[in-house]
């Protein structure tokens, strides 16, 4: 899991744990289009992603960047791949009727690490 920080319309910061993957250039997160997280990512592009090593909290990586691209194309397959990675299940088990999934690509502007 990583922590994803986005900015809400009010200016407050929202931080949530999310699943993610990496395509060799971008961090990819997946969300429903109906969620506040999507609204934040779509309207205010700067984000921060923080990953902490659960075995040693003094080992972490912070990525500051912004939304590079968002797409519905392939988003269902992406959430299924994340379900396989994080749950060991072939398909995402929490789908709701009518939900629209979006894959968001985040481009790094600054990376900082410890450990």
Image: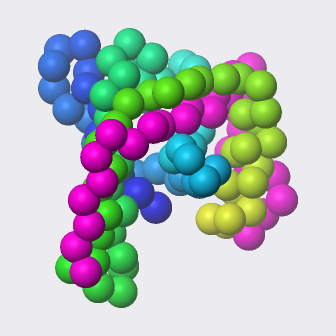
Residue that protrudes farthest toward the right in the picture: 90
Span colored in magenta: 88-115
Coloring scheme used = rainbow
Quick check: 27 left or right of 39?
right
In the image, residue 94 lies in the stretch drawn in magenta: yes
Residues 61 and 17: in front is: 61
Q: Position of residue 55 (x, y in %)?
A: 36, 86
Does the stretch in magenta take in 40?
A: no
98 lies above or below 56: above
Residue 29: image quadrant is top right
Tell me what residue is drawn at x 33 percent, y 18 percent.
Answer: 44
Residue that protrudes farthest toward the bottom in the picture:
55
Compared with 100, 29 (above or below) is: below
Q: Nearer the viewer, residue 101 or 110?
A: 110
Residue 88, x across and y down, in percent = 74, 69
- Which residue is located at x 59 percent, y 24 percent? 70
Q: Quadrant of residue 56?
A: bottom left
- Percent across and percent down for residue 18 are 47, 50
Where is residue 62, by image quadrant?
bottom left
Q: Is residue 12 left or right of residue 74?
A: left
- Residue 16 in sight here: no
Q: Nearer the viewer, residue 111 or 46?
A: 111
Q: Specify the quadrant that holds the C terminus.
A: bottom left
Q: Nearer the viewer, residue 59 or 108?
A: 108
Residue at 54%, 44% (x, y): give it.
26
Residue 65 x/y as whole percent: 34, 37
């Amino acid at each position: 899991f990583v922590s994803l920080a986005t900015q809400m319309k009010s200016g407050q910061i929202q931080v949530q744990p999310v699943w993610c993957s990496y395509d060799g250039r971008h961090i990819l997160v997946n969300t429903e289009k109906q969620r506040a997280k999507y609204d934040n990512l779509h309207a205010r592009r700067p984000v921060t992603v923080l990953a902490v090593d659960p075995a040693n909290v003094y080992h972490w990586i912070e990525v500051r960047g912004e939304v590079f691209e968002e797409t519905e194309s392939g988003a269902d397959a992406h959430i299924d791949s994340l379900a396989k990675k994080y749950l060991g299940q072939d398909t995402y088990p929490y789908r709701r009727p009518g939900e629209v999934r979006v894959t968001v690509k985040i481009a790094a502007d600054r990376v900082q690490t410890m450990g």
